[in-house]
Image: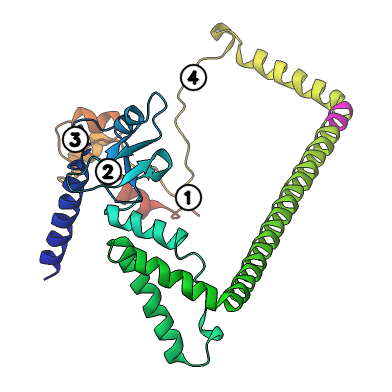
């Protein structure tokens, strides 16, 4: 199911992207797929769309009004009736304009009525007005009903507008206070950062001064160290002729017993001592055939003469 939902969302997004690229101007039929830089403008009176180039061409040379290029539309439009396309449907633009102009005075809230039923009837009446004006149904009669309601409830509408303005002013004041608080926090944070940077810079300067002062006292020691380094270097650089050659001297080991016989005698008296010479690798390491016998005899003779 999850895979199906993901695929459905992807398909919907692709379809929406295709719909965007298929948007076109009613006059020149240019689409975003052909001209990606095209800007669509929507008429707030009828909801029909024209590109910015066609709108500029239509109002060139002092033209004040034009007839909508729609096949069945008879709306007479001015330049200020066009605005950039914000919604998918042009009808939404038209409804927004109706609510901002013809129905801008309908600002009553639930607190302005004695019962919830009266407030619901008021909301239903406003929606009927908006529907009729957007869809151009009984427009003169609807406008007359709007005027009559405004005349009969002028005091209530003014009171509601006054309360709405007070709420808006309170909201703006709260936003200004929040912005001032954020600005104060930013300034405090910046001041803290500058103070911290100044403290770190002061500590660095103090450390540099201490190092400079220590260098002044350590100059004699530094000279002695340099002299010692020079003497060591000169000693290490002595010529090879002055260095005595290495001479091997067998180590005398006092075991406290008689000496172990030589290898030839051991070969004659002990069958465990082979007559052949050991491999060259063992001879290089100092191993001979009688090594193990010599070690056993040395351990046996040790301490006999003590």
* 230 inside magenta stretch: no
Which residue carries the number 3 mark? Answer: 33
Q: Main secondary structure of the magenta part?
A: helix
The numbered mark, 4 or 1, whose residue comes first in the sequence reads 4
The numbered mark, 3 or 1, whose residue comes first in the sequence reads 3
Which of the two marks, 3 or 1, is nearer to us in this view?
3
Q: Does the CB distance between marks 2 and 1 fall below 8 Å?
A: no
The numbered mark, 4 or 3, whose residue comes first in the sequence reads 3
How far is the residue under mark 3 from the one under mark 1? Answer: 110 Å
What range of the chain is rendered magenta? 212-216
* 214 inside magenta stretch: yes
Which of the two marks, 2 or 1, is nearer to us in this view?
2
Q: Does the CB distance between marks 3 and 2 fall below 8 Å?
A: no
Q: Identify the disc placed on residue 256.
A: 1
How far is the residue under mark 4 from the one under mark 3? Answer: 94 Å
How far is the residue under mark 2 from the one under mark 1? Answer: 121 Å
């Amino acid at each position: 199911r999850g895979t199906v939902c993901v695929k459905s969302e992807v398909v919907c997004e692709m379809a929406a992207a295709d719909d965007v690229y298929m948007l076109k101007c009613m006059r020149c039929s240019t689409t975003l797929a052909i001209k990606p830089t095209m800007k669509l403008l929507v008429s707030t009176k009828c909801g029909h769309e024209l590109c910015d180039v066609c709108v500029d061409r239509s109002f060139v040379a002092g033209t004040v009004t034009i007839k909508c290029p729609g096949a069945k539309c008879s709306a007479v439009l001015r330049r200020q009736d066009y605005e950039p396309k914000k919604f998918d449907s042009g009808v939404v633009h038209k409804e927004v304009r109706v609510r901002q102009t013809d129905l801008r005075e309908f600002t009553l809230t639930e607190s302005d009525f004695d019962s919830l039923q009266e407030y619901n009837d008021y909301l239903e009446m406003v929606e009927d007005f908006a529907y009729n004006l957007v869809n151009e149904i009984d427009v003169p009669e609807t406008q007359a009903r709007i005027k009559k309601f405004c005349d009969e409830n002028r005091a209530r509408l003014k009171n509601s507008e006054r309360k709405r303005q007070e709420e808006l002013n309170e909201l703006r004041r709260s936003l200004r206070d929040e912005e001032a608080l954020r600005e104060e926090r930013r300034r405090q944070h910046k001041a803290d950062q500058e103070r911290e940077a100044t403290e770190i810079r002061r500590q660095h300067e103090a450390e540099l001064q201490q190092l400079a002062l220590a260098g002044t006292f350590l100059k004699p020691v530094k000279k002695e160290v340099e002299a010692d380094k020079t003497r060591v270097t000169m000693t290490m650089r002595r010529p090879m002729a002055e260095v005595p050659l290495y001479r091997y001297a067998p180590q005398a080991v006092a075991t406290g017993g008689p000496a172990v016989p030589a290898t030839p005698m051991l070969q004659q008296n002990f069958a465990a001592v082979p007559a052949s010479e050991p491999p060259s690798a063992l001879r290089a390491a100092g191993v001979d055939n009688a090594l193990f016998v010599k070690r056993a005899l040395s351990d046996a003779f040790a301490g006999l003469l003590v």
